Amino acid sequence: MKVTINAHQLGRLIDKTISHMADDSIEPLHGIRLDLDSTHLYAIASDRYTLAVARYELLYADKGAEPYARTIPGEYLRPLREWISTQIGHASITISTDEDRLVFAAPLTEFRIATKPDIKYPDWRGLLRTIAEQTTEEAPFPALHSGFLARWADTGSTIRVRVTADQKAVLVFAEDFIGAQMPARYAGVGPVKDETIDSARALWKDVLHAGTSRADMVTDMPDADRDRSRYEATTDVRETGEDLLHQALRSTWQMYGADMDTEEGRAAFNAWVSSGVRSWMAYRFLDALYQVDPRAAEGIVGETADQLDSGEIGEWAWDEAKKAGHDPQKWYDDYKAHLEKLAAKRQAQEQVEKWERLAMAFNAATQAGVKFRVEPNPHVQWDANNNRWIAVEATTAEAAA
């Protein structure tokens, strides 16, 4: 049975679980297990100390597929991951079995892996069910290996943890992810000493009692100085999202204050509208990317910050436009022609306004009884019907309109 997954999501399944697999001393666990049921494709890895399961919901057309499970041997995972990385992120990869092989087929190439279909793999569903149904002991205080804790970083930026007992596995949840970590039984060459929260707290009694009893990390820690000038682009996803929302709202507020009776005001209105729309679009795109792949979102924010700090975003945008098959030179030529047209229109308008001001001055002088003579010219003339001086260009422009 074939199932389809895009290259990016398949890479994520491997990335979330690969650090949990065992070395080749435990052959059944030396690799990542792909397990298919009627609704999801699962990637499972364990070295007996931690257990990680990431899942991908099947496309509608693939649901109801016949279940199967195969283990990708550890020695094939690096070349498989590199092959996946050569595919475009949204490219579809079809996964199927061919006797004792797993076949990964992309639009132009395929990757075949020899497997052992009869290999005995632990009942990972049963293990996690048992851990999830554990009852909670009073004040559990298990010892956990700090090196194993680092493995959970690949699941995303946020995990939830359930602790039930000192000598039972800790349950870990994240987006489309479930896992477990066994408590540490040894520290160095000897066993971990039994300890309670009370005994651990007693070791720090003097230090803790020197502080206040009502301090709170939410309310008593200093905030960042929001008024401080920032000369470098932030590399933090949350700060980037906040900045984009702030800009979208600020643009909305500013555009309603624009003077629509002047050319400058109308230009400012259009600029604020464009800024607000693009800030909102950027926020929605960043939020969607973060929901799908937090690590990819963090990576692109950091990369973009470096590009912004370089001061060469024009060059970056030009190169990206060419790579995408666009014609940035035509965009530039069209924009330049647009500016020249605006400049010519502005110059013509300035000439009209100049002669209108001259006609107004002549009318003011006439009303004041000042005697003067005006030679025939193409700019202002006497309107005998209305007994006033008029700008010829203004009259012509109005007639044309």
Image (cartoon, rainbow, N blue to C red):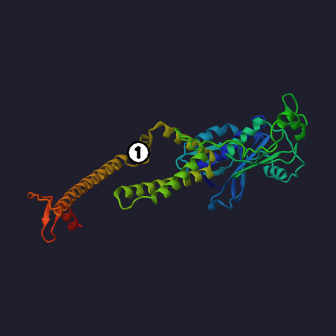
Judged from this view, the residue extending furthest toward the top is 189
For residue 142, say whether it is visible.
yes
Position above or below: 49 against 89 = above
Position above or below: 137 against 396 = above
x 69%, y 52%: residue: 175
Tell me where residue 133 appears, x and y as whole percent. Answer: 85, 54
Placement of the C terminus among the 4 image quadrants: bottom left
Left or right: 127 with respect to 106?
Answer: right
Tell me where residue 216 appears, x and y as whole percent. Answer: 76, 45
Tell me where residue 326 appears, x and y as whole percent. Answer: 40, 49
Left or right: 85 with respect to 363?
Answer: right
Pointer 1: what residue? Answer: 322
x 61%, y 53%: residue: 5
Q: Secondary structure at mark 1?
A: helix
Give 50 or 201, whichever is nearer the viewer: 201
Give 146 or 29, whichever is nearer the viewer: 146
Q: Three-letter amino acid code at disc 1?
A: Lys
Judged from this view, the residue extending furthest toward the front is 369
For residue 30, say whether it is visible.
no
Tell me where residue 286 appears, x and y as whole percent. Answer: 56, 51
Left or right: 287 with respect to 328?
Answer: right
